Amino acid sequence: MSRSQIFSGSKFEDLAGYCRAVVDGNWIFVSGTSGHAPKTGEIEEGVEAQTNQVLKVIEEALHEANSKIEDIVRVRVFASDREYVWPISAILKAKFGHFSPTNTTLITGFADPAMKVEIEVTALRQSDQ
């Protein structure tokens, strides 16, 4: 199988020379995704809004890879403050609770001080898709 790349149009992809996702066989590796709207670069202030935007961009990348959210097997969450872990976790539970991927959550700083959350995922597309 060949390797392919998916781009969201984010300025960060161009700036740092990466793609939103790499598809290699049935594996999909989605880059760390922030709450910035890919086309405009705008970012909402609240952690909940940012988390929902992140998940929207991730789902769009998975869809383009002929995959779906339930194919996610690993989640890595980066939060700028420990107070954001619970609101982020509540949104992830609502989205992922019925299939429960692995998860690692870290508290870290970001280059853009407006960022409160960044999430990367790995998905394994089911062979019958």
Image: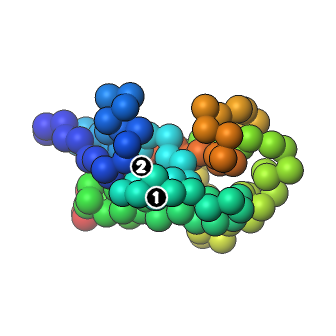
| Amino acid bearing label 1 | Ala
Say whether residue 109 is visible: yes
**Circle 1 is placed at which residue position?**
37
| x and y percentages locating residue 120 in the rendered image | 51, 43
Q: Is residue 100 left or right of residue 7?
A: right
Question: How many angstroms separate mark 1 from mark 2 (CA)?
Answer: 22 Å
Q: Secondary structure at mark 1?
A: loop
Q: Are marks 1 and 2 in contact (CB under 8 Å)?
A: no
- Nearer to the camera, 4 or 8: 8
Residue 110: which quarter of the image?
A: top right
Which quadrant of the rendered structure holds the C terminus?
bottom left
Mark number displayed over residue 123:
2
Q: Residue at x 26, y 55 (%)?
A: 65
Q: Secondary structure at mark 2?
A: strand
| Amino acid bearing label 2 | Ala
Instruction: Report crowding for label 1: few under 14, some 14 to 19, many 20 or more residues within 10 A (C-alpha).
Output: some
| x and y percentages locating residue 99 in the rendered image | 56, 63
| x and y percentages locating residue 116 in the rendered image | 69, 48
On screen, residue 31 above or below 128 = above
Residue 91: which quarter of the image?
A: bottom right
Say whether residue 28 is visible: no
- Nearer to the camera, 103 or 35: 35
On screen, residue 63 above or below 65 = below
Instruction: Report crowding for label 2: few under 14, some 14 to 19, many 20 or more residues within 10 A (C-alpha).
Output: many
